[in-house]
Amino acid sequence: MNTLREGMAELNKLKDIVEQRKLKIKRGKIIKEEVKHWLSRVNIINEGLQDVEKSCSAGSRCPLAKASLGKTILGKIGEVEKLIREHGSFSGDIVIDGPSTSGAKKKLKHALDRLNRLNSQKEKVETQKSRHENAGEVVREEVNDWLIEVRSINKVFQILKGASRRVSRCNKLEVNEIVLKKSDAVNILLQRGTFPDGL
């Protein structure tokens, strides 16, 4: 049992070093998957050690129970040694470069520019619609549908903008991906909103 405790002490020191290095990750970097996996396995083995400690402290006079506990302890020692060796494989660098955002920023800016154009177009259509209605003319249903869709896409963008302010850097990339996907809808609405046949 002492061998297991000593191994766990060494393993937990390595874990603390990795956790400290995680706190110093620079912008644009992400933790390697193998490091995340290693940390979770260390946590699992720490929990397992607590169970072994309880079994040892309970003590049993049954030889089969003692033999089983001995096997468990030997297995845990093997797991601890393996995790210590695996730490050496990534001791130099625990991070990799995150996804590039330079191209995404340009696309995002373009998408937001298109949204601004769509809103300008919406204002013009609303003004024309108001004139037609004031003159007692009936506005085509497709114009009303288009305006509803534009308002809807604006709500989506407002929600995404708010979410972008509240989420972490990694999740901002996901929000930006959604914005880029929604930009296709903006492009379609821009094309449909010309109403060449009038309102």
Image (cartoon, rainbow, N blue to C red):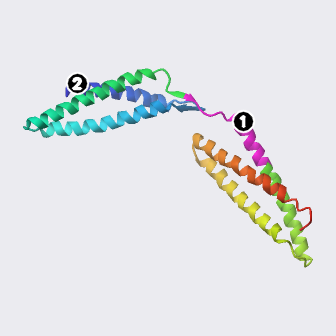
Q: Position of residue 136 (x, y in %)?
A: 90, 79
Residue 132 falls in image quadrant: bottom right
Circle 2: residue type: Thr
Which residue in the rendered view is the most extreme toward the bottom? 136
On screen, residue 193 versus residue 25, left or right, reads right
Residue at screen point 71% across, 51% down:
182
The residue to which callout 1 is attached is 103
The answer for how far apart the CA atoms under marks 2 and 1 are is 53 Å
- The residue that appears at 48% across and 20% down in the rendered structure is 92
Image vertical order of residue 41 relative to residue 116, above or below: above
Q: Mark 2 points at which residue?
A: 3
- Residue 109 x %, y %: 75, 43
Numbered disc 1: secondary structure: helix
Q: Which region is colored magenta?
A: 96-113
Magenta part mainly helix, strand or loop?
helix
Q: Residue at x 19, y 28 (%)?
A: 1
